[in-house]
Amino acid sequence: MKDNFIIIVNGREKEWNDKTISFEQVVILAFGTYQNNGRTAYTVTYTRGNNDKPQGSMVAGDTVKVKQKMIFNVTATDKS
């Protein structure tokens, strides 16, 4: 049986069908793509997470457990 969650990414509701989500997957939900080119830096923070870690930040390679109505904020910065 699949898990169905509604998560909020940059203020928009998104459907997610897994118990965990990776840093890269959050970025793709936010921007439609993940650029691993050394020039683009992403910042991912979250709130309303699971009780063991209800808020925090993520870096490339991280995964977190998903909770209904969990909130993710994602920004992209172009290194110059």
Image (cartoon, rainbow, N blue to C red):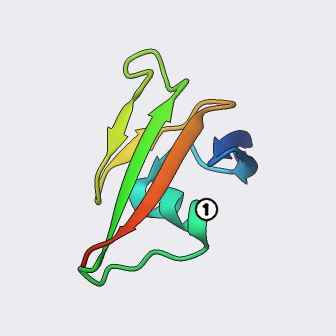
Q: Residues within 10 Å of mark 1 (few under 14, many from 20)?
A: some
Q: Amino acid at mark 1?
A: Leu
Q: Nearer the viewer, residue 11 or 63?
A: 11
Quadrant position of the C terminus in the picture: bottom left
Could you say which quadrant of the image residue 28 lies in? bottom right
Point out residue 3 in the picture as x, y percentages from the top left corner: 69, 42
Instruction: Quadrant for residue 77, please give it.
Output: bottom left
Q: In the image, 3: left or right of 67?
A: right
Nearer the observer, 50 or 8: 8
* Residue drawn at point x = 69 percent, y = 44 percent: 11
Whether residue 3 is visible: no
Q: Say whether residue 34 is visible.
A: yes
Q: Position of residue 13 (x, y in %)?
A: 76, 46
Disc 1 is placed on an element classified as helix
The residue that disc 1 covers is 29
38 sits left or right of 56 in the view: left
